[in-house]
Amino acid sequence: MKKALYIIAVALFAVSCQMDFYRSDTMTSTMLKSDPSAAVYTTDGLYSMFKDVVLFEGSEYSNNTWVKHYFQMTEFRGDNLAQGRHSEDPFTEILNYTDDPTCYNLGYFWYISYKILFGANSNIEAIQEGASNEGDLLLGENYFLRAFVHFALANIYARPYYVEGRPSNAEQPCVVLRTSTDCSKTEKATVGQVYDQVEADCKKAYDLLKGKSRRGNKGFVGEEAPLALLSRLYLYKGDWDECINISAQLLGDDPASHLDTDLAGYFANAQTSKETIWCINRSINDYQYSQHAQLGSMYYSSNGVGGIGWCEIYCSEPLVDLLYRWPDEGRRKAYFSYAAPIEGQLMVSWPEKPDGTHDYRLNVMITSSKGDSGYTPNVTDNGDGTFTAKSGSSTYTIHTLVDHKDTKYYITGYETDAEDQDDITGGTRVFLRTAQDNAKGTRLTMPAYMVSKFTGQDGEELLSSNVFFRYGETILNVAEAYAHKNDPVNAIKYMNMTRSRAGLSGEALYTTTNLADSGYDNVLDAVIDERRLELFYEGFRQLDLYRNGKEVNRHYAGEHKWEIITLDDLDAKFPAYIPYAETASSGLTSNK
């Protein structure tokens, strides 16, 4: 049986600047009060627990970091990702909503979250408010960290507070609230109670941090962070006016001035960028640091598959379509790339179910063939809007269809078993992309659409200080709030801030009269897509769909079920299992 994760016995796990570890019986609240300077080390220790490899169930595993699990668990349940092959890592189960209570990703995340909460509570109880500016700054950081971790737990292990068109989930069970070091009771609070506590802690943190200089770069919490969390909380709560008001306090008179114009370099320089509100400081000196275990390792490798990164998770075809909608889309240019492209050559692919019982789709691919004299194109442009694709003894004609701003391709006279693909002008939907060199290691069953958002810091290919809050998100929080208030003028104004920063101009900037040209029936759908373009892979998509009453359409190739996940399915499947070791030891029940 797995080692129990006793919340009631969670230790204060404090780390000094040299990453020394202290047990709770050697660094208690009483000792903190007698040595106030120790609060610096214990607070820094909480920051370290987000990123360091911590002993868990008797071992230290480089793949186990809170920050990596956070971004995977919040991103993998949406429709941005396509997994190229099955992995032994349980993220495959998370992707497929088939996780179980013994999943170590869920167990580690829960375990470390409550260690951080215990540590924050120890500091809050020990630091005397008002005794010094330095003490109040540390106290504000700890209130914020307590709020952030509770909110992260709620968004993974419980249903969202607000879902468009459905009753509120405020009274639904959530997670255990820990607001003191008294752990004599272990019982779940409701979603509403957790939101109320997060709101109160953010307001307290802001009061303590206001007007004070942060202790270092953007890896330390400053006065902006509580406002950013409140902006997100009010949006997720469906409190549109409060979201707009608190965001205005954060954004000031010129919201766009907070955006970093160096898109390609932003994430590599997140620690110092003006756009970052709060990130986790990462370094190759982090305890048990391994490039192969970094968040970006599953998404990117400069040499394609077989390089430094694993490069096993790719952009889904619907996300790729959106990234290619506008020729000047800067976010595609900055973060999206092919593994091993063959410039000047084309390939055609479409999803098909493989032999066997697995309910997923691989890609049938017609691409260039390599001989002694180089590549011979198997797909040719006929110059009249059609293409010819040759595969063995078969020859196919690919037709072009412009659907609003999207260019789509289809084959007539050919049917697949992939639902939703046989609905374009009586033909089968296919994808026409730049060819890839399979000989260099790209997946034979999946075009390798890589994302480089979490790469490049300090010249390290896969190092990145992962961003939790940035101004680009806050601006789009406001856009969504105005869309829900049926105020398209203001929603469009805020959307166009991120679109302009992405290099879009002219008809690519929205107006109240041109949204329909891009296929949108309403401004909210446009905002949801803009959030997807701006925030893909940053942990927002699954909640953006669920909160707004949208189904998760996974009719694209990958290592996942070919399905549309309805709202009823999400109600049942969305909350992650509370770990078995917790339920077995404390008697908590799961939220499934």
Image (spheres, rainbow, N blue to C red):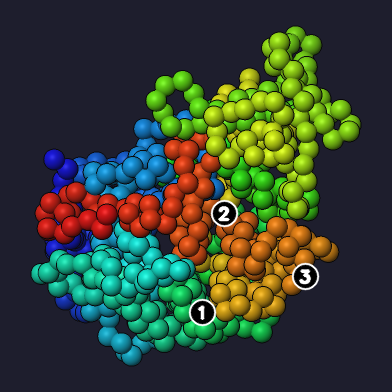
The CA span between labels 2 and 3 is 27 Å
Q: Which residue is mark 1?
A: 240
Q: Reading the chain from its start, which is encountered first: label 2 or label 1?
A: 1
Among the two numbered marks 3 and 1 on one chain, the one whose residue lies closer to the N terminus: 1
Amino acid of disc 2: Phe
As displayed, is residue 584 above or below residue 305? Answer: below
Helix, strand or loop at label 1? It is: helix
Q: Of the numbered discs in the image, which one, if any, rests on residue 347?
A: none
Label placed on residue 536: 2
Tag nearer the camera, 2 or 3 = 3
Q: Is residue 118 above or below residue 368?
A: below
Residue 86 placement (x, y as % from top left):
42, 31
Which residue ends up furthest to the front in the rendered image? Answer: 426
Mark 3 crowd level (few <14, some 14–19, many ≥20, 10 Å Cα): few
Q: Are marks 3 and 1 in contact (CB under 8 Å)?
A: no
Element type at mark 2: loop
User: Which residue is depicted at the point 42% across and 21% down?
Assistant: 356
Front residue of 172 and 582: 172
Asked if the residue under mark 3 is in contact with the one under mark 2, i.e. CB atoms within 8 Å, the reply is no
Q: Determine crowd level at label 1: few under 14, some 14-19, many 20+ residues with C-alpha closer than 10 A.
A: many
What amino acid is at disc 1? Trp
Mark number, residue 513: 3
181 relative position to 371: left or right: left
Task: Using the image, determine if residue 494 lies above or below residue 570.
Answer: below
- Please tell me which of labels 2 and 3 falls first in the chain: 3
